[in-house]
Amino acid sequence: MSASALTALAAAALAAVTAAATTPQPVPAPVTVTARVETPAVYDDEAGGSANADDPAVWVDPTRPGRSIVIGTLKEAGLDVHGLDGRRIQHIAAPQAPGEDAAPGRFNNVDIVYGFDLAGRKTDLALVSDRGRDRVRAYAIDPVAVAKGRPPLRDVTAADVAPVFAADESEVDEQRTAYGLAAYRDGDEAYVVVSRREETSLRLLELEDRGGRVGYRTEDTLDLPASFTLPDGTSWRPCADPGERPQVEGMAVDQEEHVLYAAQEGVGLWRVALDDARFEKPVLLDRVREYGTPWTYDSAEEECVLDTAHDPGFGGEHLSADAEGVTVYHAGDGKGYVLASSQGDNTFAAYDRRRGNAYLGSFAIGDGAATDGVQHSDGSTVVNVPLGRNFPQGLLVTHDGEAAPADGDRESTNFKFTPWESVARAFPRPLRVDTESFDPRDTD
């Protein structure tokens, strides 16, 4: 579907919503919860190896869930693997640059696929978007290594995988490359959705076994709108640096319904059904508050400046740009929640998982006795099943873009682990805690 057709669809949908609106309903204040565990802070400087935490994924141990691991991307520094106590148990460096003038690897997002048929064996995979080299990297997860306390991840990426978006290696170095990533299974097949940095494109890839290594092939491509027709008939495009288009990073797939939720940073949250390895028509289910606000570009400061005094009021009420990390909490009978990071106000919005995706409220992760709060969160992931003594009713893992206490002027980040029941019970009308209806290992 073309971008212009999508723009018209989005405008029509927005106009219908606006016309139907009557008296504005007050938006309840976000509730506050605290994390129980945090990973060690990493530092985005030379001494810290240019480590910048970004996106987490949880692998659930098949025999002892309390032994499960959290895998987190560190951008230029690669990957870290943590136990549920936050302790680091493995570090994987990003690939080196293949040539003097080429870009090195840079790991952006990570997700899990269970039971991929690799060399005749069911193998759990951690899949990573390598923004630096425009690839999807695959790492086999060894349960025996986890049980024995050894590094559990092993690179099984096929040597011949091609760039996800770039036409050739020189285009890779321009860095309009693989960015966000979300994975899912459909029967015996496994797929990843990958977004493109500084573009609106999404690409659907099917994983394949290439002689005991993991490769992929393109199944479909979707271009989300880059500009929008507002209800007053004017045209608007989201704030961006010159030459950039409104990109998507945070994404998650409803593993049972095969629905993609994608956060277009300066626009809002999209819902896209996935059917027979194809993208269906996207629906913009919520908009950032800044949607429709005019802006100018300050070349001296190299940033956009919003003209909030002339905000026409077409934005949403629940997300402040950027819309970022997205994750899905699965419960029985199609119930559950879609969670999206509202990076601009350090909160997370919760939507009903069922069709319609009604907004249910927001929460923040504040300072607690054991951990500091979460600010500027990029990636997140939620697991409903019991994960041992510390997380017997599920776990929410969130990136913290401002880890404390600070070490001078060093930019520090990490991941926070929050019991799911802490989030669920903080809402005036508590969210569900369902540890039995969904098994992330069995999504057929």
Image: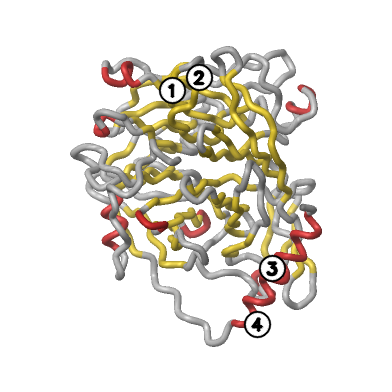
- According to the picture, the residue beneath numbered tag 1 turns out to be 122
Q: Which class describes the residues within 10 Å of circle 1: few (<14), some (14-19), or many (20+)? A: few
Q: Earlier in the sequence, mark 3 or mark 2?
A: 2
**Element carrying mark 1:** strand
Identify which residue, 191 or 422, lies in the foreground: 191
Q: Which class describes the residues within 10 Å of circle 4: few (<14), some (14-19), or many (20+)? A: few
Q: Position of residue 379 (x, y in %)?
A: 48, 44
Q: Residue at x 73, y 56 (%)?
A: 225
Quote the CA–CA distance across marks 2 and 1: 6 Å
On residue 118, the disc is 2
Q: Is residue 43 left or right of residue 278?
A: left
Q: Are marks 2 and 4 in contact (CB under 8 Å)?
A: no
- Which of the 4 quarters of the picture holds residue 58? top left
Is residue 77 visible in the rendered structure shown here? yes
Identify which residue, 257 or 376, lies in the foreground: 257
Q: Are marks 2 and 1 in contact (CB under 8 Å)?
A: yes
Q: Is residue 116 above or below residue 430?
A: above
Quote the CA–CA distance across marks 3 and 1: 48 Å
Q: Earlier in the sequence, mark 3 or mark 1?
A: 1
Q: Earlier in the sequence, mark 4 or mark 3?
A: 4
Pair 3/2: label in front: 2
Pair 2/4: label in front: 2
- Which of the 4 quarters of the picture holds residue 9? bottom right
Q: Is residue 410 above or below residue 100?
A: below
**Element carrying mark 3:** loop
The three-letter code of the residue at mark 2 reads: Leu
- According to the picture, the residue beneath numbered tag 3 turns out to be 292
The three-letter code of the residue at mark 4 reads: Ala
